Amino acid sequence: MSKVVIINHPLIQHKLSIVRDQKTSPVDFRTLISEIGSLMTYEATRDINVKEITVQTPIAEAKCYDIADNIVICPVLRAGLGMADGIHKMIPSAKMGHIGLYRDEETLLTQKYYCKLPVTIADSTVILVDPMLATGNTAVCAVDILKEAKVKKIIYVGLVGVQEGIDQLQKHHPDVDIYLAAKDAVLNEHGYIIPGLGDCGDRLFGTK
Ligand code: URA
Protein backbone atom coordinates (compact mmCIF):
# COMPACT_ATOMS: atom_id res chain seq x y z
CA MET A 1 0.00 0.00 0.00
CA SER A 2 1.11 3.53 -0.78
CA LYS A 3 2.22 6.16 1.71
CA VAL A 4 -0.10 8.84 3.04
CA VAL A 5 1.99 11.72 4.40
CA ILE A 6 0.48 14.73 6.14
CA ILE A 7 3.30 17.26 6.12
CA ASN A 8 2.94 19.06 9.41
CA HIS A 9 5.95 21.34 9.01
CA PRO A 10 5.44 24.63 10.92
CA LEU A 11 6.01 26.80 7.82
CA ILE A 12 3.42 24.89 5.82
CA GLN A 13 0.93 24.91 8.70
CA HIS A 14 1.46 28.66 9.20
CA LYS A 15 0.81 29.39 5.52
CA LEU A 16 -2.15 27.00 5.41
CA SER A 17 -3.85 28.84 8.27
CA ILE A 18 -3.73 32.08 6.24
CA VAL A 19 -4.94 30.27 3.12
CA ARG A 20 -7.94 28.91 5.05
CA ASP A 21 -8.94 32.40 6.26
CA GLN A 22 -11.85 33.69 4.18
CA LYS A 23 -10.48 37.24 4.52
CA THR A 24 -7.28 36.37 2.59
CA SER A 25 -7.23 38.13 -0.79
CA PRO A 26 -6.83 36.22 -4.09
CA VAL A 27 -3.35 37.78 -4.48
CA ASP A 28 -2.15 36.49 -1.10
CA PHE A 29 -4.02 33.22 -1.62
CA ARG A 30 -2.18 32.58 -4.92
CA THR A 31 1.21 33.50 -3.43
CA LEU A 32 0.75 31.26 -0.40
CA ILE A 33 -0.61 28.30 -2.37
CA SER A 34 2.43 28.50 -4.63
CA GLU A 35 4.79 28.73 -1.63
CA ILE A 36 3.15 25.73 0.03
CA GLY A 37 3.56 23.85 -3.26
CA SER A 38 7.29 24.65 -3.21
CA LEU A 39 7.70 23.57 0.41
CA MET A 40 5.76 20.35 -0.07
CA THR A 41 7.94 19.42 -3.05
CA TYR A 42 10.86 18.95 -0.65
CA GLU A 43 9.08 16.05 1.06
CA ALA A 44 7.11 14.71 -1.89
CA THR A 45 10.26 14.16 -3.99
CA ARG A 46 12.25 12.49 -1.21
CA ASP A 47 12.09 9.06 -2.93
CA ILE A 48 12.80 10.06 -6.55
CA ASN A 49 15.88 8.50 -8.14
CA VAL A 50 19.20 10.29 -8.38
CA LYS A 51 22.31 9.51 -10.42
CA GLU A 52 25.89 10.13 -9.49
CA ILE A 53 27.69 12.79 -11.52
CA THR A 54 31.10 14.41 -11.31
CA VAL A 55 31.38 18.18 -11.14
CA GLN A 56 34.59 20.18 -11.43
CA THR A 57 34.69 22.81 -8.68
CA PRO A 58 37.37 25.57 -8.81
CA ILE A 59 39.41 23.31 -6.48
CA ALA A 60 38.81 19.68 -7.44
CA GLU A 61 36.34 17.13 -8.75
CA ALA A 62 33.27 16.62 -6.58
CA LYS A 63 30.98 13.60 -6.53
CA CYS A 64 27.43 14.99 -6.85
CA TYR A 65 23.92 13.77 -7.47
CA ASP A 66 21.46 14.79 -10.16
CA ILE A 67 17.80 13.88 -10.60
CA ALA A 68 17.67 10.70 -12.66
CA ASP A 69 13.91 10.53 -13.25
CA ASN A 70 12.06 12.44 -15.94
CA ILE A 71 9.71 14.53 -13.84
CA VAL A 72 6.38 15.76 -15.16
CA ILE A 73 4.19 18.09 -13.09
CA CYS A 74 0.54 17.58 -13.89
CA PRO A 75 -2.04 19.92 -12.36
CA VAL A 76 -5.73 19.14 -12.58
CA LEU A 77 -7.44 22.26 -13.98
CA ARG A 78 -7.96 24.64 -12.69
CA ALA A 79 -7.32 24.52 -8.94
CA GLY A 80 -4.08 22.55 -9.39
CA LEU A 81 -2.39 25.43 -11.25
CA GLY A 82 -1.52 27.41 -8.10
CA MET A 83 0.41 24.65 -6.34
CA ALA A 84 1.92 23.45 -9.63
CA ASP A 85 3.51 26.88 -10.07
CA GLY A 86 5.36 26.49 -6.74
CA ILE A 87 6.40 22.92 -7.54
CA HIS A 88 7.71 24.03 -10.94
CA LYS A 89 9.87 26.67 -9.24
CA MET A 90 11.60 23.85 -7.33
CA ILE A 91 12.01 21.63 -10.41
CA PRO A 92 12.25 24.08 -13.33
CA SER A 93 13.44 21.37 -15.73
CA ALA A 94 10.23 19.39 -15.25
CA LYS A 95 7.77 19.24 -18.10
CA MET A 96 4.13 20.08 -17.47
CA GLY A 97 0.95 18.25 -18.41
CA HIS A 98 -2.59 19.56 -17.89
CA ILE A 99 -5.72 17.56 -17.23
CA GLY A 100 -9.16 19.24 -17.22
CA LEU A 101 -11.94 17.37 -15.43
CA TYR A 102 -15.47 18.28 -14.36
CA ARG A 103 -18.29 16.50 -12.62
CA ASP A 104 -21.41 15.86 -14.72
CA GLU A 105 -24.18 17.10 -12.44
CA GLU A 106 -26.69 14.54 -13.80
CA THR A 107 -24.61 11.38 -13.77
CA LEU A 108 -22.21 12.66 -11.06
CA LEU A 109 -19.44 11.00 -13.09
CA THR A 110 -16.10 12.69 -13.68
CA GLN A 111 -15.68 13.79 -17.30
CA LYS A 112 -12.52 14.80 -19.13
CA TYR A 113 -12.72 18.06 -21.11
CA TYR A 114 -9.02 18.69 -21.69
CA CYS A 115 -5.81 16.70 -21.63
CA LYS A 116 -2.42 17.81 -22.88
CA LEU A 117 0.48 15.68 -21.73
CA PRO A 118 4.13 15.82 -22.84
CA VAL A 119 4.73 13.41 -25.76
CA THR A 120 7.61 11.94 -23.74
CA ILE A 121 5.51 11.22 -20.63
CA ALA A 122 5.84 7.41 -20.82
CA ASP A 123 8.17 6.12 -18.07
CA SER A 124 8.15 9.50 -16.29
CA THR A 125 7.60 10.21 -12.63
CA VAL A 126 4.48 12.39 -12.47
CA ILE A 127 3.65 14.79 -9.66
CA LEU A 128 -0.14 14.96 -9.90
CA VAL A 129 -1.40 18.17 -8.32
CA ASP A 130 -4.95 18.75 -7.10
CA PRO A 131 -5.29 20.76 -3.87
CA MET A 132 -8.57 19.35 -2.58
CA LEU A 133 -8.80 15.56 -2.14
CA ALA A 134 -12.56 15.48 -1.46
CA THR A 135 -14.53 12.51 -2.89
CA GLY A 136 -11.35 11.28 -4.58
CA ASN A 137 -13.18 10.72 -7.91
CA THR A 138 -11.22 13.42 -9.75
CA ALA A 139 -7.92 12.05 -8.48
CA VAL A 140 -8.86 8.50 -9.52
CA CYS A 141 -9.81 9.71 -13.01
CA ALA A 142 -6.59 11.74 -13.37
CA VAL A 143 -4.48 8.74 -12.32
CA ASP A 144 -6.41 6.53 -14.81
CA ILE A 145 -5.45 8.97 -17.58
CA LEU A 146 -1.79 9.05 -16.51
CA LYS A 147 -1.59 5.27 -16.28
CA GLU A 148 -3.08 4.98 -19.78
CA ALA A 149 -0.16 7.17 -20.87
CA LYS A 150 2.17 4.53 -19.33
CA VAL A 151 3.89 6.72 -16.75
CA LYS A 152 6.29 4.96 -14.37
CA LYS A 153 5.29 6.46 -11.04
CA ILE A 154 2.67 8.88 -9.75
CA ILE A 155 3.00 11.06 -6.64
CA TYR A 156 -0.19 12.86 -5.59
CA VAL A 157 0.33 16.29 -4.01
CA GLY A 158 -2.65 18.12 -2.50
CA LEU A 159 -3.36 20.63 0.19
CA VAL A 160 -6.34 19.38 2.18
CA GLY A 161 -7.95 15.95 2.06
CA VAL A 162 -10.51 13.85 3.90
CA GLN A 163 -10.36 10.15 4.73
CA GLU A 164 -13.09 9.37 2.16
CA GLY A 165 -10.96 10.80 -0.66
CA ILE A 166 -7.81 9.09 0.55
CA ASP A 167 -9.66 5.74 0.76
CA GLN A 168 -11.13 6.16 -2.72
CA LEU A 169 -7.74 6.94 -4.29
CA GLN A 170 -6.00 4.11 -2.43
CA LYS A 171 -8.78 1.64 -3.33
CA HIS A 172 -8.34 2.28 -7.07
CA HIS A 173 -4.64 3.11 -7.11
CA PRO A 174 -2.82 1.60 -4.12
CA ASP A 175 0.55 2.41 -5.72
CA VAL A 176 0.14 6.22 -5.60
CA ASP A 177 1.80 7.97 -2.66
CA ILE A 178 -0.31 10.81 -1.25
CA TYR A 179 1.13 14.02 0.23
CA LEU A 180 -1.19 16.53 1.94
CA ALA A 181 -0.76 19.50 4.26
CA ALA A 182 -3.87 18.64 6.30
CA LYS A 183 -6.53 16.00 6.77
CA ASP A 184 -9.93 17.53 7.59
CA ALA A 185 -13.10 16.09 9.08
CA VAL A 186 -15.73 15.40 6.42
CA LEU A 187 -17.44 16.55 3.23
CA ASN A 188 -20.66 18.55 3.17
CA GLU A 189 -23.61 17.59 0.94
CA HIS A 190 -22.08 19.56 -1.98
CA GLY A 191 -18.79 17.68 -1.77
CA TYR A 192 -16.89 20.54 -0.11
CA ILE A 193 -14.37 19.79 2.62
CA ILE A 194 -15.29 20.92 6.15
CA PRO A 195 -13.67 23.17 7.33
CA GLY A 196 -11.46 23.14 4.19
CA LEU A 197 -10.83 26.47 2.52
CA GLY A 198 -13.81 26.86 0.21
CA ASP A 199 -13.60 26.56 -3.57
CA CYS A 200 -9.90 26.59 -4.30
CA GLY A 201 -10.27 27.50 -7.99
CA ASP A 202 -12.60 30.42 -7.26
CA ARG A 203 -10.29 31.72 -4.53
CA LEU A 204 -7.19 31.42 -6.76
CA PHE A 205 -8.74 33.23 -9.68
CA GLY A 206 -11.28 35.50 -7.95
CA THR A 207 -14.18 34.02 -9.92
CA LYS A 208 -16.72 34.28 -7.07
N1 URA B 1 -12.94 21.44 -4.34
C1 URA B 1 -12.73 22.63 -3.71
O1 URA B 1 -12.30 23.59 -4.34
N2 URA B 1 -12.98 22.71 -2.40
C2 URA B 1 -13.46 21.67 -1.68
O2 URA B 1 -13.68 21.81 -0.48
C3 URA B 1 -13.68 20.44 -2.35
C4 URA B 1 -13.42 20.36 -3.68
Image (cartoon, rainbow, N blue to C red):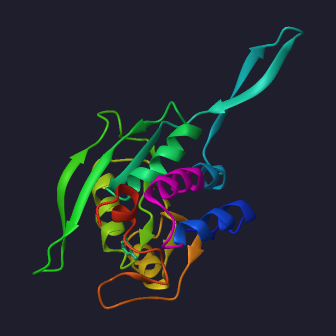
Which residue: 31% across, 47% down?
98
Q: In the depicted view, which residue is nearer to us: 150 or 139?
A: 139
Which residue: 56% across, 78% down?
183
- Measured as percent of width and height from the top left, residue 150 is found at 33, 47
Q: In the depicted view, which residue is nearer to us: 137 or 84?
A: 84
- Measured as percent of width and height from the top left, residue 105 is found at 14, 78
Residue 126 in view here? no
Is 102 magenta? The answer is no
Which residue: 49% across, 58% down?
29
Question: Where on the image, by quarter, is ligand 1?
Answer: bottom left
Q: Is residue 116 left or right of residue 139?
A: left
Which quadrant of the view contains residue 56? Answer: top right
Identify whether 5 is placed above or below 92: below
Identify whether 96 is placed above or below 43: above
Which quarter of the rendering shows the N terminus?
bottom right
Is 22 magenta? The answer is yes
Which residue: 64% across, 52% down?
39
Which quadrant of the view contains residue 79? Answer: bottom left
Q: Is residue 191 left or right of residue 160?
A: left
- Measured as percent of width and height from the top left, residue 77 is found at 30, 55
Q: Is residue 92 left or right of residue 45?
A: left
Which quarter of the rendering shows the C terminus?
bottom left
* Extent of the magenta region: 21-37
